Image: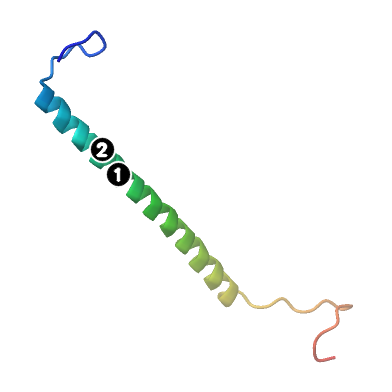
Amino acid sequence: MYNETNPFPVTQEEYLVNKRIAKKNVIAGSILGVLSALSLAANLTIGYVLYDLLTPPEPPKENQKTLVG
């Protein structure tokens, strides 16, 4: 199969194999993209929770009422 946009001749069988591989690569890339986004969300959530747990609470300001008094 030869055309002006692709100067390298490729047989029909090679073209179909390459097309199938390209389709699988697109699917695999999409899955990896979704997993990467989920991983980022999990890391941000864990980081926020750990930061919230490990930082000491701020002392109340002088004119701020507390729950006790």
- Identify the residue under disc 2: 23
Question: Where does the N terminus fall, quadrant-wise?
Answer: top left
Locate residue 57 relative to residue 63 in the image: left or right: left
Q: Residue 66: percent from the left, percent from the top?
A: 81, 85
Circles 2 and 1: CB distance less than 8 Å? yes
Q: Residue 4: percent from the left, percent from the top?
A: 24, 8
Measuring 87% from the left and 78% from the top, which residue is drawn there?
A: 62
Q: Is residue 18 above or below residue 62?
A: above
Viewer-closest of 60 and 23: 23
Circle 2: is it few (<14), some (14-19), or many (20+) Cα within 10 Å? few
Question: Where does the C terminus fall, quadrant-wise?
Answer: bottom right
As drawn, the residue found furthest toward the bottom would be 68
Q: Residue 42: percent from the left, percent from the top?
A: 46, 63
- Identify the residue under disc 1: 27
Measuring 55% from the left and 67% from the top, which residue is drawn there?
A: 48
Identified by mark 2, the residue type is Lys
Measuring 30% from the left and 40% from the top, which residue is drawn there?
A: 26
> Residue 35's image quarter?
bottom left
Q: Secondary structure at mark 1?
A: helix
Identified by mark 1, the residue type is Ile
Measuring 64% from the left and 77% from the top, which residue is drawn there?
A: 56
Q: Is residue 22 above or below residue 47?
A: above
Q: Secondary structure at mark 2?
A: helix
Circle 1: is it few (<14), some (14-19), or many (20+) Cα within 10 Å? few
Viewer-closest of 67 and 24: 24
